[in-house]
């Protein structure tokens, strides 16, 4: 017997505006962390590099999940704003290997952590996020102009 996914509960303007503000924060944090990573070196301060990297990866993970076609009832998804999932290209961020690394190196203390690759393709990740978010904001301006303007500014 096949199960049918329940439709998501529509959210009001206040909830969408608050969620959009949180999403903007996630995007801003990835950008700030990327700038810090580009200027800090392991030789100067390895802990600062790790703080910036972990910040970027944590927020990248949240943005990736925002573009998922489905989620828990309390998850904020692009579909909540646009009425349907938004397909965006994020091949690296959605890859199985990166998902495993994000989960085990960033979000969970695990025994497998030490065996996982340490290098991260920061430029590729930030470029994927920027393209996806730019696409989302463009669509949001067309479908929810009040939310878009209050959170992401005028076009």
Image (spheres, rainbow, N blue to C red):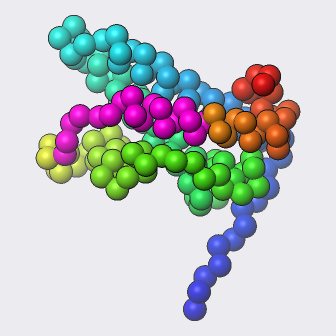
x then y, percent, for residue 124: 40, 34
State which region is magenta.
116-133
Residue 92 shown left or right of residue 109 in the figure: right
Q: Is residue 91 left or right of residue 77?
A: left
Q: Residue furthest top?
A: 44
Q: Residue at x 34, y 56 (%)?
A: 96
**For the point 42% across and 22% down, which residue is it?**
34
User: Residue 139 location, x and y as percent?
Assistant: 74, 41
Q: Is residue 93 above or below residue 96?
A: above
Task: Give the residue drawn at x 35%, y 18%.
Answer: 37
Tell me the chief SS of the magenta region.
helix
On whether residue 122 falls in the magenta region, the answer is yes
For the C terminus, give its image quadrant.
Answer: top right
Asked where in the image residue 24 lies, by quadrant, the reply is top right
Q: Position of residue 116 (x, y in %)?
A: 19, 45
Q: Which one is in front, 92 or 114?
A: 92
Per the image, is 56 magenta?
no
Residue extending farthest bottom: 1
Assign the N terminus to one quadrant of the image.
bottom right
Residue 82, how many percent across, how many down?
75, 50
Tell me if I can see residue 111 in this picture. yes
């Amino acid at each position: 017997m096949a199960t049918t996914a329940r439709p998501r509960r529509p959210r009001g303007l206040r909830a969408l505006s608050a969620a959009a503000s949180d999403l903007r924060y996630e995007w801003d944090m990835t950008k700030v962390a990327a700038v810090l990573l580009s200027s800090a070196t392991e030789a100067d301060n390895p802990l600062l590099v790790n703080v910036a990297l972990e910040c970027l990866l944590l927020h990248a993970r949240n943005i990736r999940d925002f573009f998922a076609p489905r989620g828990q009832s309390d998850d904020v998804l692009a579909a909540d704003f646009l009425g349907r999932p938004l397909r965006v290209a994020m091949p690296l961020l959605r890859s199985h290997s990166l998902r495993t690394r994000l989960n085990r190196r960033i979000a969970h203390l695990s025994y497998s952590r030490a065996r996982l690759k340490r290098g991260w393709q920061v430029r590729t990740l930030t470029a994927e996020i920027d393209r996806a978010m730019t696409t989302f904001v463009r669509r949001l301006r067309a479908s929810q102009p009040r939310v878009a303007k209050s959170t992401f500014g005028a076009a």
